[in-house]
Amino acid sequence: MELLVGVDVGSQSTKTAIYDIDGRTVAEAVVDTPLKWSGSQSVEQDPEGFYSATLRTIRECVSGAGIAPDSVLAIGIAGQMAGVLGIGADGLPTTEYDSWLDARCKQEVEFLERNAGDLIIERTGCAAMIDHAPKIRWWARQHPDVFSRTVKFVVPSAYVAARLSALPAEEAYVDRTHLHFTGLADAAKCAWSEELAALVGVPLDKLPRIVDPTELIGTLSPEAASETGLLPGTPVAAGLGDTAAGALGAGIVEPGQVLDTAGTASVLAVCTDGFRPDTRTRTLIAMQGALPGQWISLSYLAGGTLVTWLQGLLVGHADDAALQLLLDEAERVSPGADGVLFCPYVGGRILPAAPAARGGWSGLNFHHGRGHLVRAALESVAFEYDRYLSAALDLFPELKPCEVRVIGGGASSQLWNRIKASVLGLPFLRLDRKNFTCWGAAIVAGKATGAITDMRGTALRSTSVEHVDGSDDEAHSLYRAHLVRYRRWTNAAVETPDRTDQIDREVIGL
């Protein structure tokens, strides 16, 4: 049997799965990679934790399923996308992984928006936000000694692939599906922008080379082979970002298809065939997909993080039992949460960028309970999705979405799927597979070695629908009216922090 390994270096865990060429799962394993919070702004992870978790999950898959090492054709790595880490001349980390949840660089975001907001979105396809450019600028300004020791800035998937193959630091890379998040690239040309690099203050030689996801960047080193149970010399593909990998694994390969990635980040993505930056609303990101010529318009918020936070806040701990308790209570509340609204910008709004924005509930009275709070929070994610989809259809009016494919941990919640379906007026399709990101990474690995010749066809053939959560017409009408209140209130929530800061400065005489 010929097998492919797919790895997903996620925000809270690293997952590995091994598949046959047709996408049937042979083995799976997962290891937690916890976030390290320090106050309300700093969120980091240990890059070596990503690597050790990858070694461990591959080893568990190989040993647990009794896989013959010579049956594995290649390894593909996917990973979280908007954060960045530095490596030194030895290829080892000079920084912690600066997570996409880390908001220490919010002043840098504001600087870039003021000084090059239009240029950044026109070149990269993504408005200035908490991603690579402001994070790198923050390291340069706040920790110049670390910045000077850093040879390259890389993303988690590329770091892990480089460690697996003992890739020299000078051969560090980033694949093209990450370019929108760099804030430093001409995404349509797959090249670094000298103008943006100069503005951010990043020497071009600190940026890695740009490659296609299907490029073979090396082979498994003897040390990594010993740790994983695979053969030295097993090919390692460049890999890709987790959103691009999830879209491929879910069969999102044709213009007009819509994907909901209900993970730590809640991502709504629409498949398109062209690069059209959202210069008007600054809400959407234009991301290159795994397929040649494929573009994906998307936006996201910290939806999964929000649900975990709710469990700790309202139950006192976060686990399956706490989650089910809250979902059961939210299920008993009618659509619209009896007038309660929730603003989901607890850690700031990601897009359009408003790092100082904050969240909270509105419309509460003494008759409301915990279920209302939870239902309003779930509905807020759906309302954000409506904003994203409306912006995408403004940019691509020729698209006619007819369904949404939902993946990620949140896909298992029928309640949440029904809420989203009713807000958008589109059915939500749960697919008959547990892990789409790993499968997307494995497809890329198969293409890199020639074992898979048609990624589009493979993705479509390997995807089937398990269940459909439909839209409720009555709830849809109610939500259309509710959206007007939601948008008015959340717009005020974004504007209020700036006014508060101004008042504080006036009071203390600044």
Image (cartoon, helix red, strand yellow):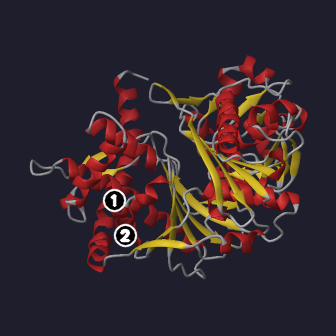
Q: Quadrant of the C terminus?
A: top left
Q: Is residue 435 left or right of residue 237?
A: left
Q: Is residue 425 left or right of residue 53?
A: left
- Marks 2/1 in contact by CB < 8 Å: the verdict is yes
Quick one: 427 or 459, which is closer to the camera? 459
**Which residue carries the number 2 mark?**
423
Quick one: 263 or 443, which is closer to the camera? 443
Instruction: Look at the numbered disc 2 and give the secondary structure of its residue.
Output: helix
- Sequence-wise first label, 2 or 1: 1
Residue 450 at what x, y percent from top left?
Answer: 87, 63
Distance between mark 2 and mark 1 Cα atoms:
8 Å
Q: In this figure, what is the number of numbered marks?
A: 2
Residue 196 at what x, y percent from top left?
Answer: 77, 45
The residue furthest top is 145
Q: In the rendered view, would you say 308 is above or below 503?
A: below
> How would you rate the neighbour count of disc 2 (Cα within 10 Å): few for under 14, some for 14-19, many for 20 or more?
many
The answer to whether residue 198 is visible is yes
Instruction: Please state which amino acid type lies under the numbered disc 2.
Output: Val
The answer to whether residue 245 is visible is no
Quick one: 436 or 102, which is closer to the camera? 436
Q: Splitting the image into 4 quarters, where does residue 335 fall?
A: bottom left
* Disc number placed over residue 379 in the picture, else none: 1
Instruction: Please state which amino acid type lies under the numbered disc 1.
Output: Glu
Quick one: 208 or 446, which is closer to the camera? 446
Residue 484 at what x, y percent from top left?
Answer: 32, 66
Q: Splitting the image into 4 quarters, where does residue 312 fall?
A: top left
> How would you rate the neighbour count of disc 1 (Cα within 10 Å): few for under 14, some for 14-19, many for 20 or more?
many
Residue drawn at (73%, 56%) of the image: 442
Q: Is residue 309 left or right of residue 250?
A: left
Q: Splitting the image into 4 quarters, where does residue 31 fall?
A: top right
